[in-house]
Image (spheres, rainbow, N blue to C red):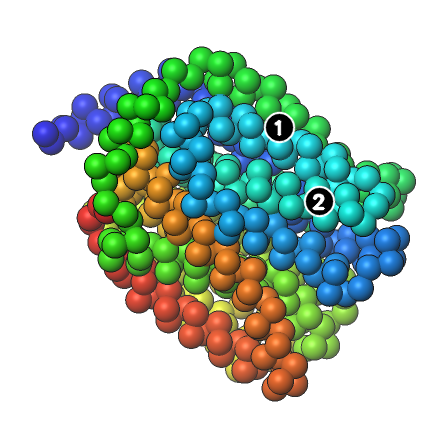
Amino acid sequence: MIVPSDTKATIAKKSLSLGWPIILGIVLIALTMRSPLTSVGPLVGSIRESLGLSNAAAGLLTTLPLLAFALLSPFAPILARRFGVERTLLYALVLLVAGIGIRSLTATASLFAGTALIGLAIALCNVLLPSLVKRNFAHQVGLMTGVYSVSMNLCGAIASGVSIPVARDLGFGWNGALGIWGILVLLAALFWLPQARASRTSAGAVASGAAKRRSLWRSPLACMVTIFMGMQSLLFYVLIAWLPEIMISRGLNEDSGGWILSLFQIAALPVAFIVPIVAGRMKNQRLLVIIMTVLLFVSLGGLYFGGNAFISLCIVLLGIGGGCAFSLAMIFLSLRTKDAFDSASLSGMSQSVGYLLAATGPILFGLFHDLTVSWNPPLLLLLVVSALMLLSGGGASRNRTV
């Protein structure tokens, strides 16, 4: 049955007005999904010196959560069917608090154990939030995706910037600077507790309906969404890992390299909110995929061929293109599915592959740099990744559902 547009608008307004506790809960969860990870990078040097870690072991602090994402993402929909989405999210927040607390203890074993728990907890949130949005705000998917995307990215950027001042200027040390984010997670868990108690999801009914559905791995559309998710994840985490080093090789100092990384993340914030809203109103999203690709090609090409005079402009365009890619990847999980179950399943499938690629991408990128003794050939690889995003994004943007 086709629902008139005015009826859809009425339903959307009603769902937003009645669902404000869920909206606030989603925002609070989104605020906790990147800050425990992005707060680590600036403190790696202090952690390494304090615990006597090798560079390889210190690098594992970034890679380990991504591997946890890839490991648990396919099982998140199964847990949600067993316990309900709200309860599974609450359990994830409790696990995240525990992980942050364990990681903040001054010991090597607890550092890595806590990091692994953090990765497992955030993996559940990554997969289930799009499903929750699809179920509760089916007529406002774009707006809600934009809300939680910008919340996640904004808090992540803030965490990167305040880690050093909190650790050094306030005297918290690296473990205190990492541990303070547990307060935010605890607040999110306390707020989400009534939602979990009020949940009356029938796991048996959902499971019985799920048994009749074929595997998404057999769906070409689901594979296109998965490839797109993987390519954009690889691009983002490669740039997070190596962009400051690329800038330093161009003659910039360490402070400028860090500022460039912040500029890259800040430039993505407006599109992280706007793109999902625009995409949700379009019949298909091919135009956005094309715009995204042009931005990536121009910015990466500018870094490859251009001099230092245009670095800031290239980084802003790169941030806008990357933010557009992330937003499209997130909203595809809702637009390309018929219901919350399919959204969770597609989210688990695509994020499992995506974060596996994200975990290996920085390593391969750095290895290619070592082999070529230059950053230009690796930048060409990112152009290839952008081309793959164009192809997979074209397939993922079709007005169909899995």
* Residue drawn at point x = 50 percent, y = 55 percent: 355
User: How far across and how far down the image is residue 216, in percent?
Assistant: 28, 49
Label 2 vs 1, first from the N-terminus: 1
- Give the residue drawn at x 64%, y 41%: 117
Residue named by callout 2:
113
- Horizontal side of 167 relative to 67 (left or right) equals right
Q: In the image, what residue occupies the spot 60% across and 36% down? A: 32
> Which one is in front, 335 or 205?
205
What residue does disc 1 label?
94
Q: What's under tag 1, amino acid-wise?
A: Val
The answer to whether 218 is drawn above or below residue 122 in the figure is below
In the displayed structure, 339 sits above or below 359; it is above
Locate residue 353: give its quadrant: bottom left
Q: Dot 2 surroundings within 10 Å: few (below 14), some, or many (20 or more)?
A: some
Q: What is the distance, in whole Å, between disc 2 and disc 1 at their CAs?
A: 15 Å
Is mark 2 in CB contact (under 8 Å) with mark 1?
no
- Given residues 227 and 318, the one toward you in this image is 227
What percent of the width, then of the height, locates residue 131? 38, 35
Local SS, label 2: helix
Q: Residue 118 — which label?
A: none
Is 147 displayed left or right of 12 in the figure?
Answer: right
- Amino acid at dot 2: Ala
Residue 273 appears in the figure: no
- Above or below, 398 against 89 in this view is below
Please report the residue visible at 81 percent of the width from the left and 39 percent of the height from the top: 105
